[in-house]
Image (cartoon, rainbow, N blue to C red):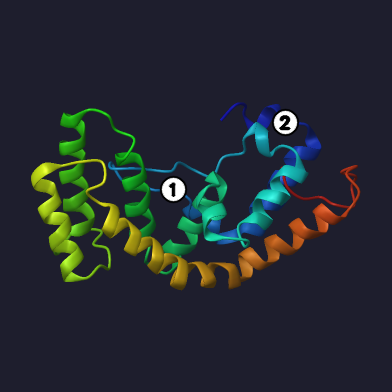
Amino acid sequence: MCRTLAAFPTTCLERAKEFKTRLGIFLHKSELGSDTGSVGKFEWSCKHSKEGNFSEDVLGWKESFDLLLSSRNGVAAFHAFLKTEFSEENLEFWLACEEFKKLRSATKLASRAHKIFEEFICREAPKEVNIDHETRELTRMNLQAVTATCFDVAQGKTRTLMEKDSYPRFLKSPAYRDLAAQASATAASPASGGPAEPLHT
């Protein structure tokens, strides 16, 4: 985080507090705890200190699943929502795969691949994702010669599952709908940021 909340002007602090209220259950559950890939707490960063940018970010989440996944705040909110449905393992696996593909060391790839498999893919894994037997076995075979693409099929199937199942429910959730309505109102209002719109950082 580029600066702390204490450094923000009073109006920004008021917007941050109101936004936390709007997010409700999202914020106090917005951490991922996996040693194979993680997204930290929902952060109040400088780039979201302007309400216009933040409103565009929030409204973009309903435009496409890709836009949601490309937003750090969107991922944090979506993960928190998934935790309320006890299905956060799919997103955590997808994120772990994204981080995995960035590795360049063959040794690190092999080590991380086995950790991901043991955490998300194998039978009775602590965060077992919902994939079919054929995909699980294909992934197991891929571990015999680890490459950056060895989880691609499994990752693609969990992404499709989230997009078709969890994502629509997230958009229909009261917390997101309320937040989106406020973001729409802010985006449509004059950019003065006066006291009539006490929202967002």
| Image coordinates for residue 41, horizontal then vertical, percent | 49, 43
**Secondary structure of the residue carrying numbered label 2:** loop
Q: Say above or below: 78 vs 106.
A: below
**Which residue was labeled with disc 1?**
31
Q: Is residue 56 visible?
A: yes
Tell me the tag on residue 8.
2
| First of labels 1, 2 by sequence position | 2
Which residue type does callout 1 highlight?
Glu
| Image coordinates for residue 163, horizontal then vertical, percent | 46, 66
Which residue type does callout 2 highlight?
Phe
Label 2, residues with CA under 10 Å away: few <14, some 14-19, many ≥20: some
Q: Which residue corresponds to the image point at 25% horizontal and 59% vertical from the top-left?
A: 127
Q: Which residue corresponds to the image point at 32% horizontal and 46% vertical from the top-left?
A: 96
Residue closer to the observer: 4 or 119: 119
In the rendered view, does 149 fall on the left or right side of 77?
A: left
In the rendered view, does 37 fall on the left or right side of 126?
A: right
Q: Is residue 122 visible?
A: no
